Image (spheres, rainbow, N blue to C red):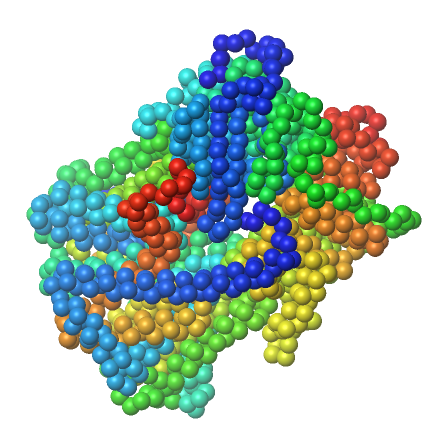
Amino acid sequence: MLISSLILGALHAMVPLTITATGEILSERAGVVNIGLEGILLISAFAAVVGAEAGGPLAGLMVGLLTGALLGLIHGIIAVYFRGDQTVSGVGLNILALGVVAIGIVDRWGAAGFHRVERAFRVPPLSTPLGPMSPMVIVTILLAALTWYLLQHTNLGLKIQACGENPAAADAAGVRVERVRLFGAVYAGALTGIAGAYLSIDWLATITENLPAGRGFIALATVVFSRLNPWLAVLGGLIFGFFDSLGLVASTSQALTRVIPYQFIQMMPYVVTLLVVAGVIGRFRAPAASGQPYRRE
Amino acid sequence: MDPRPVEPQELDAITRRERRRQLRAALGGLAEILIALVIGLGVGALVMRGAGYNWRLAYEGLLIGSFGDQWAIADTLASATPLILTGLVFGLSARAGYFNIGAQGQMVVGALAAVAVGAHLSAPPVVAVTLAFLASALAGAIWALPPAFLKATRGVHEVISTIMFNWIAHYTALYLVFNVLNDPRSAERTVRVLPGARLGALIPGADMTAAIFVAVGVAVFMYWLLWHSPWGYEMRIAGLNPSALRYAGANPLWSVNLTFILAGLAAGLAGATQIIGRPPTYALYGDLSNVRNLGFDGIAVALIGRNHPLGIILAAIFIGAMGAGARMMQIMAGVPLDMVRIVHGTVIIALAAPEAWTLLGKFLGRARARRAPAPPAPAKTVHR
Amino acid sequence: MPDRSAPPAGAADQYKPVSVLAGAPPWLEMRGITKVYPDGTRALENVDLVVAKGEIHGLLGENGAGKSTLMKILSGILPLTSGRILLGGREVSLRSTHDALAHGIGMVHQHFSLVPTFNALDNIILGRGALLASPARAAARARIRRLMEETGLHVPLDIPVEQLPVGTQQRIEILKTLDRNVDLLILDEPTAALTPQETDQLFTVLRGLAARGTTIILITHKLREVLALTSAVTVLRHGRVVGSRLTEGATAQDLARMMVGTERMPDVKARREHQKSEPVLRVAGLTVKGDGGQDVVKNVSFEINAGEIFAIAGVTGNGQSELIEALAGLRPIARGRVYLLGQPINGKSPRELYRMGIAHVPEDRHRLGMVAQFSVLENSILGVHHEPRFRRGVPGTIHWGKVRRYARDIVRRFQVVTPSLSTPMRSLSGGNQQKLVVGRELSKSPSLVIAGQPTRGLDVAATAAIRDLLVDIRNEGKAVLLVSADLDEVLALADRIAVMYEGEIMAILQKDQFDRERIGLLMGGVRDGSAAG
């Protein structure tokens, strides 16, 4: 019982980390880094609730995806065409999201800071031997597979990698660097949007002013852990997700919180993320031109 | 790049061109900030309109609440005080090439230290205040060290490490507030610091205290450090061209640590200003609401202030005014306090893309050229 | 399109010089090309270039004359400000490399355009085929094999190119461009990283291509290459065409005069002869590791005496950079001992080495030697900024007034042309930047000056000035370690030359043993058995 709830918990906590990380992997391979993932998660989580309450969970997922894609597009345009500072733009997204969602919740439901998503608007779970499981777990694996296939087995994948490693070379070979990079940014945004929708209309079944609670940044750590390989992002998502769900499970267990204060249990995913990133990073080499605007001449 | 060698007789022309260029750059920089502020306020107005609020009334409330009278101005400056410090945290780090977003956590730890020292150490007023400030500065610096160390030795990106440390500080603070520093008489806050460790209001009825002089003093120190000391000189090299740092004889490891420690000191002080320098509470709230988001707002402050100490002071007053005026905005127009975050975020996004305006100008120029009669001479003209 | 079915053997012998100047019909016409950069720099002014089909045309000029800019416009990388480009009499619009390739125009860049983590095959097929289709590696492999047979350019297809020598990368570049079926092949300084022998081989290949109808434009500043390969040449100076002429009948002197105009390359300053004295630097069995952890400097030993310029010649990337980085304290010494005036310097930091008397003009001045955004004033104390002589009362405060006097002195003595001391370094021309860097280093009153590629990318006047400075300090009795990939520079300046190849010193030659061909062979790894030590 405890084992199966831990496994399911880890799988469910993996979903937002891995989907977000997978999108960001493709984007960083193309040369665009987005540290505004946390903000995209938050805004699309909110938008997904609005969508789901209007048209059901599938509509919610779609609205989340589109919202994420739009925010990714804005970030991409700033990064690629305006050659702006990608980190600054990402920080701006994070702060903007806090405002948009705080005001949005009040505006939409009249209650400050918190809104519960009714069962009818949530993504219905599948029943498995372990217990009810979100279909998004499977979607996560499919998205990782899709991303891996795109990167490793298509001409587009070659172009993406070239744009991240040496955009001048890609340009000389006739690759339209700007478009490829913009695609990367939008792809990361769209996937993060799905992850945001999952947070609100599936896993946590609620929308709050700070729903992702740092998961956007843990997803960035997952990207580092994965060495830009989508399959390793699945593994990283599982590791981080395990401690995330451990915190959620443990903080409701009276027996445990008597020994370890619940604040320390809730701290665990962040501590583990730090330790793993510090331990694993080693010789990780990001694409040479990642995060840098490409300018001819 | 000028393909020709520069002839001495061309010098005058170059000097003039150079002066014009520098002036243009300075004006352009200012214009960029102003345009970004206008865009931020504009988007804020649009969102409020979309959500059915009276945005004119909201901005009127914002203005009255922040600059309406001497108390409002004092409240604005009180709100600006911690923001100057957290802005300096980000600004100093950015000058040295690091994206240190750990001010939030370092400030929380600093606030805890101020409570611990201020509430338990009875000493003469000046001594108590000084010790509380020192303790929180030290706590902030200690909290900043692991990210610096991980950056220098393991190559861990500071964005990830500082965010994780922010969360760890958050939960540590929640634990301490309820279990160690809690006030038996009040469930919602820690013990209050002893009267000897409190800075009084400079204008009765407003929040501003002498803490603002601490903040401005740190800004002056940062200015001296960056532009008038060899250590700041090295920090700026690290920020602009890290490869040149070792060539210049500096020790990069030392440079990372010094930057993070100094930034941490400032963040810790920011925490202290909210505890010993902010009437009437003189304690940390259980929900941490009196230090909430101050670290993140510091990022906005530094970016708007272009990471320059003077700019940071002005930007902190701007952001502080939005904080202080937000309550009046809420009262007059019913707009939630967090509205101002939409403005902050939009301003930052607009600032991230300075080339947008150049490109926009080019685009408009091209459109105008297309509408105008075709130029007679060359068959193919690419507008630059 | 080149006729791939033509027999490869002997194709080079069939090449007959073709040129518009000799009556052939024009095929490529660039008319009135002007390029103004956004910062107002006029890089090209009303330039005309006319080339016939199958012609090998040289584009000659100094660094900064506008050759690369003109060709980047032709290959769609840079937009032109005004002017027209015609191909076979029809005007074409080249707004991207994509457009240029569609018109059969391909360029091999000076700085290679290869993705370092890709192998040759992936680099060649990059950017082709349907987006979501699998890369057609098998078909490409067969096609490139054929192309390698035809051209004689053989490369390994499955090794990441970052692990391959530069000469091989150059060949991959050319194969990549040829595989696009280009009619017009532009090569930007293709021999910069090649040995003389590899250069000959490349020229044979190019003649073969031209014989089969490919038009070739060769950007170079080397007169010998123009004379050896081209049928006609266009000379650019300061962004304008000086003239075009047939290569046949031209002499190196003619071309040099067109290239540098009246500014004659001044002779290098007279050197004073003096007694051999104590060695200033003694290097014994030095081994240094590269970024990848492998040995890139292998058991190297030499001495440099006071009053001599000791030059290290060699094709770039044979360990010279790592050698000087190790001597300057920027890279750890793996094995061996190094002594400066008898004192061991192993493990010393750059700051300690400066105090012991080493000045370092780095190879990559933009990356190491200066901070581009800093003012001239701030750059003038890079490395000595911590010294008490620039301090004032308040502990640790830099006395900018004293720095100003110091900087003004450097600017005057080394004739740095700058509008003011507060001008950002990046606004200076390359030559003036380098004069400031050299001046700053020489002002440290060193006993050893390490100079890496000190004149790379500079114009004639600046080059001459820097070379004179190096001879001056030699004449003052100081030791100079000069590392340069420019063989002419090495031959003109050095008292002794060491040739480096794959991390080893092939030979150390005395002044009377200097011989261009022999050094060329040594640079290519051919030991002649009679190498003197």
Residue B323 locus on image (x, y percent): 27, 73
Residue closer to the observer: A222 or B187 = A222
Say whether residue C34 is left or right of residue C286.
Answer: left
Please indicate, yes or no, whether residue B109 appears anywhere in the rendered image: no
Residue closer to the observer: B70 or B272 = B70
Q: Give the residue furthest to the front.
A: B376
Picture residue at 34% right of the left edge, 88% below the top: B202
Please indicate, yes or no, whether residue C508 appears anywhere in the rendered image: yes
Residue closer to the observer: A296 or B140 = A296
Picture residue at 41% right of the left edge, 62% below the top: B28
Picture residue at 57% right of the left edge, 71% below the top: B228
Residue C38 locus on image (x, y percent): 45, 49
Say whether residue A181 is left or right of residue C437.
Answer: left
The relative height of residue B27 versus residue A184 in the rendered view (above or below) is below
Residue closer to the observer: B383 or A4 = B383
Picture residue at 63% right of the left edge, 40% below the top: C62
Quadrant in the rendering for residue C404: bottom right
Say whether residue C527 is left or right of residue B68.
Answer: right
Total number of numbered discs in the rendering: 0
The relative height of residue C485 versus residue A110 in the rendered view (above or below) is above
Residue A1 locus on image (x, y percent): 20, 45
Quadrant in the rendering for residue C235: top right
Residue B281 locus on image (x, y percent): 28, 82
